[in-house]
Image (tube, helix red, strand yellow):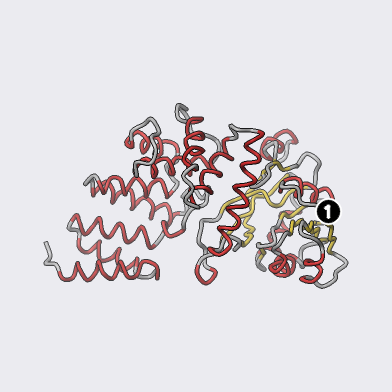
Amino acid sequence: MRLSVCMIVGNDAATLPRAVGSAAEIADEVVILATAGTEPVERALAASARIRLVHFSWCDDFSMARNASFSIAAGEWILWLDADEWLNSAAIPQIQACLSDASTLAWLCWIQDQSGDDGAPRFSPTPLPRLFRRMPQLQVAGRVHEQFSPDIMETARRLRLHVRQSDVRIFHDGYSTAAEAVKLARNIRLMQLELNDNPQHFQRLIRLSQALLKLGKAEGLDYLLQAWRQIADADHPPAVPLAAALLDSIIVRQTRGECDSGRSLEELHAVATAWFPRWPPLIWRRANWHFKLGRIPTAARELENILRLAMEKEYQSAPSFDMDLLNGRTHLDLGICYAAMGVRAEAIRCFNAAMRFPRWMPAARRNLEILHKSPPG
């Protein structure tokens, strides 16, 4: 089965050789839509008969560019890559195996962030439908954070095909600290344009609030509350995983006294427990709340739950979250709980575990010193 790798490239041609090179062994062609002119791409890449380079006049809409790249593709299958993404060697046989499955419409690939220190993972991997059959029914929508519309699961059901989880990992480092502010500002502008046409778009309201609040813009709270009001009275969890991040933001901002959701913090934490029992940020937030209220054993149980979910790999991975919650940070916090409870041996064990992570080593060392200086009992 022929495979087309489809990419959009703007001002990020510098990382393009890595992306194209990583897919060279598996791709029958690489379709590149250049939104900032073809010359930067030509300079970055050596000429190749398998590269189809097309200029696309930028129109403030990633979905239009993305769909245009899909329409140019000639392969039976499409692999969607961005210029700041790449495959490793393990992905090649995995993708080859996926292409031979006649009953599958699309494969979910793990988007693995590598924007932490020394290229380490910073955020949890997220499964997205990046490998799929080239079909006219598969179109994306959204000026930014584009997604299949209709939902690809719905299309698969209609066609009596499947959307399956693969082991393929697509590595990504485009959200390094240096690049993040620029991309957030661009995304804010595009999402505001989109909300002009659809003011109640649930996911856009959440993402816009997140971007604005990351940049310290107070108006992000207005969008946050608009999204919250759409689900505040629901009696079941929304189907959109991003709702977990919305609930987390509401809890954080209400704890700080910055907004009023119309529910108490206790009610909000109860909703979080019922709707998203395996998403680590909400569990950690709840542990912190219990700790501040003096419910130390309860806080410890919540933190133990995070570490259990991490060990058994049963945690909810989407929406993406800070990977520190699965290791150093939670070990440190659990050690503090055990120390407060007088469970000395367990506290030492947790602080030693936190010492393995450079970010948490100083705090873990300080706590160990305090513990060793204090008399047992």
Please indicate whether residue 235 sits to the left or right of residue 298 in the image: right
Across and down, in percent, residue 236 comes to 47, 30
Task: Tally the marks.
Answer: 1
Q: Is the N terminus in the top left, top right, bottom left or bottom right quadrant?
A: bottom right
Please indicate whether residue 91 sits to the left or right of residue 118 in the image: right
Dot 1: what SS?
loop
Please name the residue shown 58% across and 32% down the image.
200
Please name the residue shown 36% across and 36% down the image.
270
The residue furthest front is 218
Q: Name the residue under label 1.
A: 75
- Residue 311 position (above or below residue 157): below
The amino acid at mark 1 is Gly
Q: Is the C terminus in the top left, top right, bottom left or bottom right quadrant?
A: bottom left
Q: Quadrant of residue 4?
A: bottom right
Please indicate whether residue 368 sits to the left or right of residue 225 in the image: left
Instruction: Return the residue nearer the eye: 219 or 251.
Output: 219
Across and down, in percent, residue 174 comes to 61, 61
Please indicate whether residue 352 sits to the left or right of residue 151 in the image: left
Please name the residue shown 57% across and 52% down the image.
126
Q: Counting other residues with Cα less than 10 Å from the Cα at mark 1, is it few (<14), some (14-19), or many (20 or more)?
A: some
The residue furthest right is 49
Across and down, in percent, residue 163 comes to 67, 44
Across and down, in percent, residue 188 comes to 59, 47
Instruction: Return the residue nearer the eye: 195 or 162.
Output: 195
- Residue 217 position (above or below residue 42): above
Please name the residue shown 53% across and 42% down the image.
242
